[in-house]
Image: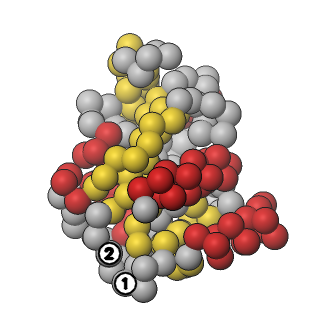
Amino acid sequence: MNTSPYSSEVFDVVDENDLVIGQAMRSEVHQQALLHRAVHIFARSEYDQWIIQKRSSQKDLDPLLLTSSCSGHVDAGEEYRCAAVRECSEELGVSLKRMDLLEILRVSPCLETGNEFVRVYLTKHVISPVPNKEEIFCLEAMNLEQIKEKIKKEGELFSKSFLHLFPLVVHILQRLH
């Protein structure tokens, strides 16, 4: 019997065009490698550094690995941006509105994303997070160069999804500035 707090979650199952074709329990989606949806949010601290989280040891996926400021699955019937707002609240204790997030990237499913269509958002404003200890072990704030250096020296400390998304995010940030 699965007693994980995540076991009752239901996700939309999507096709290769990100169109909903059904719904399934979280465990079924992951066990059968079904295409589904997720969000990643990159946020800045008051010192203009990027916040990255070390995931809680209680997480069923990538426990104790470093990843984006917050991330999560899109629930069945939920829109990507709404999921991003929800995840910021659940993981970081930050109340945002949909308009506080800038969508910068859409990534198609691959092994690194865990068969997820991913939308990546930036917070438009600096945030002051209050991490949910059930979700997050700790937060770190670093500039882009420090993150790059940490990846180069200790890449095994990062989730596969972060290692896949981060270079794409950096490229977009360079184009935005």
Q: Which residue is mark 2?
A: 126
Residue 96 shows up from this direction: yes
Q: Is residue 35 left or right of residue 119?
A: right
N-terminal of the pair, mark 2 or mark 1, is 1
- Asked if 66 appears above or below 104 in the picture, the reply is below
Classify residue 71 by image quadrant: bottom left
- Between 138 and 96, the one lying in front of the other is 96
Q: Is residue 21 left or right of residue 101?
A: right
- Asked if 145 appears above or below 58 in the picture, the reply is below
Classify residue 123 by image quadrant: bottom left
The image quadrant where one finds the N terminus is top right
- Asked if 61 appears above or below 26 in the picture, the reply is below
Q: Position of residue 4 (x, y in %)?
A: 51, 50
The image quadrant where one finds the C terminus is bottom left
Disc assigned to residue 46: 1
Residue 61 shows up from this direction: no
Q: Are marks 2 and 1 in contact (CB under 8 Å)?
A: yes
Disc assigned to residue 135: none
At 68% from the left edge and 60% from the top edge, which residue is drawn? 158
Amino acid type at circle 2 is Val
Q: Position of residue 63 (x, y in %)?
A: 63, 60
Secondary element type, mark 1: loop
Instruction: Report the coloring of the rendering.
Output: secondary structure
At 56% from the left edge and 78% from the top edge, which residue is drawn? 142
At 62% from the left edge and 52% from the top edge, which residue is drawn? 167
Q: Label 2 crowding class (10 Å Cα cut-off): few <14, some 14-19, many 20+?
A: some
Amino acid type at circle 1 is Glu
Q: Is residue 175 left or right of residue 65?
A: left
Q: Position of residue 153 (x, y in %)?
A: 81, 70
Which residue occupies the extreme bottom position in the image? 47
